[in-house]
Image (spheres, grey):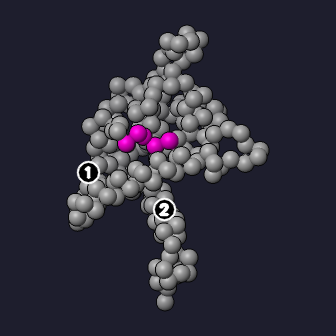
């Protein structure tokens, strides 16, 4: 018989690190399923990948910005970010604007259609998670939200150190999570 402690590293009393790693692996498994993404993003974003949805949210909350800055914050090269941006741009969800600080450069920002879609995605996600957590006590729901944001912020702060190798001098990992004081419009 395999119990949860065996699955979480073979200890009778798994450490918090073992528990978080196990929970994180389960979240990644669920997040990779297309039906879960449809449920959390709502029907409006049925044809967006998880990366597209995350990029749209990031630009909505933190843009406009140059492509090179966006790529650096996401820890990818410009060519990778260019293909991701082109997908959203082709759908009319992001647009390019002149950079007022340097007229030779352009900034990527969320278009009006992108902002409207992001609001619908945010509302669908909030409703989905409210439904999933509906049987939890209010203080437990609030604690999960606060701790999840705290965990994401600490993971983001540790990212450069975690992924720094002697051969890599650039940024790595995902972009920093949103400032807890900032929230998505109507999300």
- Callout 2 secondary element: helix
Residue 14 in view of the camera: yes
Q: Which callout, 2 or 1, points at the residue further toward the start of the chain?
A: 2
Q: Circle 1 is placed at which residue position?
A: 127
Q: Provide the major secondary structure of the magenta segment.
A: loop
Quarter of the image for residue 9 reads bottom right
The residue at the point 46 percent across, 43 percent down is: 177
**Residue, far bottom:** 1
Q: Is residue 110 placed above or below 178 in the rendered structure?
A: above
Residue 74 in percent (x, y) is at 56, 39
Residue 26 appears in the picture as rendered: no
Which stretch is magenta? 176-180
Left or right: 135, with 10 as reference point: left
Q: Which residue in the rendered view is the most extreme toward the right?
A: 167
Residue drawn at the location 54% of the way across and 46% of the way down: 157
Question: Residue at (51%, 72%) from the top-left corner?
Answer: 15
Residue at the top extreme? Answer: 103
Q: Disc 2 designates what residue? A: 24
């Amino acid at each position: 018989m395999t119990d949860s402690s065996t699955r979480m590293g073979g200890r009778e009393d798994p450490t918090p690190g073992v528990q978080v790693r196990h929970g994180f692996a389960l979240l990644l498994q669920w997040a990779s399923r297309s039906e879960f993404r449809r449920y959390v993003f709502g029907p409006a974003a049925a044809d967006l990948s998880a990366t597209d949805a995350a990029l749209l949210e990031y630009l909505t909350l933190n843009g406009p910005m140059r492509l090179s800055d966006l790529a650096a914050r996401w820890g990818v090269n410009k060519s990778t970010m260019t293909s991701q941006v082109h997908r959203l741009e082709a759908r009319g969800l992001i647009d390019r604007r002149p950079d007022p600080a340097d007229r030779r450069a352009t900034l990527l920002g969320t278009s009006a259609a992108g902002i409207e879609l992001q609001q619908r995605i945010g509302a669908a996600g909030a409703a989905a998670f409210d439904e999933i957590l509906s049987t939890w006590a209010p203080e437990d729901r609030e604690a999960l939200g606060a701790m999840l944001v705290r965990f994401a912020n600490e993971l983001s702060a540790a990212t450069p150190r975690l992924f720094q190798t002697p051969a890599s001098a650039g940024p790595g990992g995902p972009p920093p999570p949103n400032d807890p004081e900032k929230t998505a419009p109507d999300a």
